[in-house]
Structures are given as structure tokens and as C-alpha cells.
Amino acid sequence: SYELTQPPSVSVSPGQTARITCSGDLLPKEYAYWYQQKPGQAPVMVIYKDSETPSGIPERFSGSSSGTTFTLTISGVQAEDEADYYCQSADSSPSYHVIFGGGTRLSVL
Amino acid sequence: QVQLAQSGPEVEKPGASVKVSCKASGYTFTNYYIHWARQAPGQGLEWMGIINPSDDNTVYAQKFQGRVNMTRDTSTSTVYMQLSSLRSQDTAVYYCARGDFGDANLDYWGPGTLVTVSS
């Protein structure tokens, strides 16, 4: 079945730029979405349709895509950005279903 | 503001069924899908299925077909997810989330409902 692959962990220092990748064969045809999840909380959408930022999400969050890889970029990382991040897409074969990546733990050192 | 309020934690025995509710407010209930996803302890997110509150149509993930049933009550703007034949591996936090028609985003999430399956 179709999969989205993320690195298990990414570490950065405060103020640096964090990049989290998500690869999957369907990404050129389907949009990708990103969610932030802090411990004990529900996920929050931080990027939709590859690169759009929902209202209320800080401008330091951005998304981009190239071929079969989608990248979440957090510029000027802050301590509060430490969380798990999940990419997500959808597929219609053989029937509609939503797929999540395995998640990436972002550590702010 | 958009809110999804979920029912409280449940403890069930193996083989039993559980029914979790998700009450929507702050928007027109029939204009958006409701997705269900779950997260086992220390694990990632797993999508279970989707319901269209306007016509009651559902699509379930292949893994849960035959065991899950999603329904809605438009009079109370509430969606229900029932999972049957529970086993210990079903112990997880179950989330409902709102989704746009024609898009695959899950833009607002409920706080989650912990379901524990234990003998």
C-alpha cells in the first residue's frame, strides 16, 4: 500500500532552520498536509495544500514540494516548536483513504 | 469558533464494542466531513474512516471494514464511531477531525477520547 516516509527525528538549536521531509510516490499528484502534535494534545494543522498556512499559524512555518518529496520548513525555530510533526495525503486507489507519515520528533536543543 | 467535543474515556473488555461521540459546533454541520483517526500509546496517527454528515455516506479504511460503523445525528450535530470486537491492540486515543469537501485536510480536531481495552 501507499506510504509516506518521514525521518524519525530532527534536532536543531533555537534560531536555526528545521527541515522535515516527507516522501511518497503520490505526492506529485496529491496535496500534502502537515500537523504539529505536542505531548498530550490533539494535532494542529500547520500547512495545507503543500504550502498554504492556516490563519493563526506563525509565518516561520512554510511548506514546499519537489517531485515526490514534500518539506516542512520552520525558520527561526523556537523552543515551543518542539513537537511531533506528521505529513498526510490521500489516495483514491482502490478507494478513498487518508495516509499519515510515521511522524518526526523535532527536538530543540 | 469551530469546536469538536468528544465523549469521555472508556474502558472495555476484549470482544466488547465501544461508541465514541463527536459533537460539532461553530459551523454548519452538514457542510464538512468528519474523519476519525486513532493513536496508540507512543505510536503515530492512523486514519480509520470518514463520514459525510449531509448524506450519511461513509468510507472506511480497509483495516477496519467490518468492525467500524460511523453514524451521524443532524439534530444534535453529532457523529458517532462504533468499533466492535475490541482487542488490546485497539487501546488508543480516538480523534474526530473536520475535513473540507473536495480536500483532504483535517483542519480542526477534537481533544481525543482514550479507549482502553483490558480484561
Image: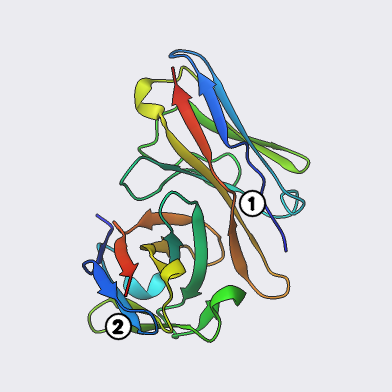
Q: Chain of mark 2?
A: B
Is residue A74 at all visible to an observer of this figure?
A: no
What colouring does the structure picture have? Answer: rainbow
**The residue tagged with tag 1: helix, strand or loop?**
loop
Q: Position of residue B52 (x, y in %)?
A: 45, 77
Q: Dot 1 corresponds to which residue?
A: A31
Does A46 sit above or below residue B75?
Answer: above
Q: Dot 2 corresponds to which residue?
A: B74
Which residue corresponds to the image point at 73% horizontal and 71% vertical from the top-left? A93
Q: Say which quarter of the image contains residue A66.
A: top right
- Measure the C-alpha gap from mark 2 to mark 1: 30 Å
Q: Chain of mark 1?
A: A
Q: Position of residue B83 (x, y in %)?
A: 41, 80
**Nearest to the observer: residue A22 or residue B29:** A22
Q: Quadrant of the N terminus of chain A?
A: bottom right
**Nearest to the observer: residue A73 or residue B47:** B47
Is residue B106 at all visible to an observer of this figure?
A: yes
Does A19 sit above or below residue B86?
Answer: above
Q: Position of residue A22 (x, y in %)?
A: 65, 41
Which residue corresponds to the image point at 43% horizontal and 14% vertical from the top-left? A14
Which residue corresponds to the image point at 25% horizontal and 71% vertical from the top-left? B10
Amino acid type shown at disc 1: Tyr
Amino acid type shown at disc 2: Thr
**The residue tagged with tag 2: helix, strand or loop?**
loop
Drawn side of residue A71 relative to residue B3, left or right: right
Drawn side of residue B72 relative to residue A98, left or right: left
- The lab-note entry on whether marks 2 and 1 share a chain reads no
